Image (spheres, coloured by chain):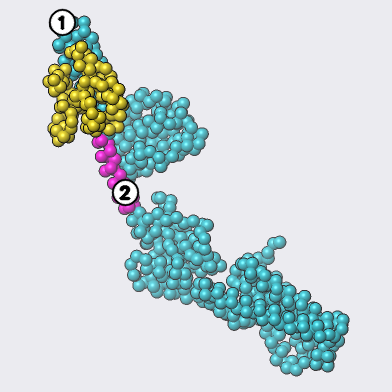
Chain colours: A cyan, B yellow
Amino acid sequence: MTRLRRPPLGIAVVAFVVGIGALLVVINGEHNIHRGAYAALALGIGWGFTGTGLYAWRRRPGNNIGPLMIAVGFSGLLKALTFSNDSVVFTIGSLAEVLIYALLVHLLLSFPSGQLESGVDRLLVAIAYFNTTVVQLAGFLFTDPAKEGCARCPANPLLITHSHAAAAIVAAQMDISIALLGAVVAILYRRSRDSTTSQRRGLASLACLPFAFLVGLMRFRFSQAEAISSLVGRLGGGGGRGALRRALAEALGDPTLELAYWVPSQAAYVDAEGQPMRVDPALRDKIATTIENEGRRVAAIIHDADLAQERDLVQAVGAAAALTLENERLDAELRAHVDELRASRARIVTAGYAERQRLERDLHDGAQQRLMALGINLRLARDRIGSDAQEAAALLDASLEELREATSELRELARGIHPALLTDRGLEAALNGLAGRSPVPVELVETPHERLPSSVEAAVYFVVAEALTNVARYAQARTVSVAVVRSNGHVDVAVSDDGVGGADPAQGSGLRGLSDRVAALDGRLELTSTDGDGTTVRARIPCG
Amino acid sequence: MGKTVLIVDDHPSFRTSARRMLEADGYEVIGEAADGSSAIDAARELQPDIVLLDIRLPDVDGFQVADRLAANGATPAIVLTSSRDRSDFDYEIVASPAQGFVPKSDLSAEAITLLTR
């Protein structure tokens, strides 16, 4: 069923007409006293609730509170029909006279969301409706108004027979009503205790039914203004880190409120200390409301789910604090960057030690061992040269082989420390060298012809070298393309393969080390890898 | 027949050169091992007269291998060797049950004979 976004104007007209009709019925009734006072009460309840309900419906079209209040208003007017001198109208009024209580229970238990949130709520409301319809009808079937002390009341056309059963039914109806009242009061008390300040105001107003409900709705507006005014006052008072969170918590009446600041460069939230903070949209009992300033995301206010109905208030309070939030966001972003820099510096130092250990191990296991063997062979050759020239020649051949291997290993090692080709002839030649040594065919799409700052050339070289090494080891690729483009004050590097993809950037220290090396130049390294769709390593490094 | 030798080193090129050198001088190389644990097994099985033992091995170091061989009773003569200088291991060499240390750069059959006679 489609819910009406706006209340039909006809409801007001009908309420007015029915109200006038009820007024006439009460005034002309011959079997009741205090007609004037009752007419005023019926109109007060009927028109008051209907008017307030129309206002609530218009203000919150998605909420059932408005329609429920209108129903209460109409049931109040129906109750006036018990004053009628006509037996049919009198009967309708008598049957409907207690319906208003069930509607009030429904209204109270569904405030403020308009929904019956729990099974207990739904059960109580069902009992209330049963009590005010079925039980009421049952009692009326055995009630003769004339024998109940109302000699001038019209006859009951539904009367089966006047019986004591009616008294028993009415007593049962009363017991059910008292039990219901107790349960509703207990639920409302618990709800009031657990709710936010703003909701408590609404509930308190609701408890002073009927007209105070209007005040409750009006107070929502006042409480919004009051909250913003108190917030602005507190924001001016300083108070250091955490003061903003406390001010917002007080303004919204939610002491558990938390703030998460948006860091665009990391596309993530951090707390006031700059530590990563997860803002889960499915947090239990919590809701995150995003606050923007001039169209840019600034922060998220993580607040009690009870404030879901007052998102407007949260947004308004957030908007009032947007400038201060922006300042705190900048502080948090700075702290996040400092933390990242500190971690990156530590990683670079650690990586430096690890690199030195690797070099020592490579030297020891490689060239040094070959040189030791070479020494032994040369000594043996020297000893044999007089007695066994052929053996001496074989030993010298073996020595030459060891020397060739040692030279090759030293060359590789030196290239790993810093490639001489890069220093001497620049990036283009060095990348060509890398491409030539790669076991996977490399297409050099573009490389800068001019020389770049040596730190940038080195970073680009090692990004490409590490990416090509990873392609050869893991990608099972047929080809790989390398593009290094200088534009707009940056060098953009892209190494893309057509391999199996599925690379995890969190795995392996090589990419992490490269990321730190690139970050040290204020650049960024990214890895894109989808299963079955190859891998691309991209780096962007400032290059003025 | 010359003394029997077990060569323990994780670098094949060094083992080959050492074997050639020792055999040229009359030693009989009866086995090679590339790490500490296989060296202990080989020594137990082959009962060599001399173990030429590299200090830096992939699993346990040469000092630990020497300790375990000594604890086994019938201890062969152990000659430690390394591509590093003696000064790097002075204390450990003195504390070790090995007969002595020869840097790889000075390794010769004569040096081993001198330490193990």
The residue drawn where x is 53% and y is 77% is A201
Q: Given the image, on which type of amino acid does mark 2 rest?
A: Ala
Q: On the image, which quarter does residue A483 sit in?
A: top left
Residue B47 visible in the current orientation = yes
Q: Name the main secondary structure of what is drawn in magenta.
A: helix
Q: Is residue A223 above or below residue A400?
A: below
Q: On the image, which quarter does residue A466 sit in?
A: top left
Q: Please provide the residue range marked out in magenta.
A: A337-357
Task: Answer left or right for A97 relative to B79.
Answer: right
User: Observer-nearest residue: A221 or A242?
Assistant: A242
Q: Which residue is mark 2?
A: A343
The residue drawn where x is 16% and y is 27% is B99
If the image is split into quadrants, where does the N terminus of chain A sit? bottom right
Where is residue A83 shown, x and y percent of the image?
78, 87
Query: Which circle marks residue A387 in the picture?
Result: 1
Q: Secondary structure at mark 2?
A: helix
Task: Answer left or right for A302 relative to A147.
Answer: left
User: Label 1 vs label 2: CA separation?
Assistant: 65 Å
Q: Residue furthest left?
A: B114
The residue drawn where x is 67% and y is 70% is A123
Q: Is residue A221 above or below residue A397?
A: below
If the image is split into quadrants, where does the C terminus of chain A sit? top left
Q: Mark 1 near mark 2, Cβ–Cβ under 8 Å?
A: no
Task: Answer left or right for A478 relative to A152.
Answer: left
Q: Is residue A1 above or below residue A124?
A: above
Where is residue A11 shown, x and y percent of the image?
72, 74
Residue A400 visible in the current orientation = no
Q: Is residue A505 above or below residue A88?
A: above
User: Observer-nearest residue: A381 or A290?
Assistant: A381
In the image, residue A346 lies in the stretch drawn in magenta: yes
The residue drawn where x is 23% and y is 15% is B28
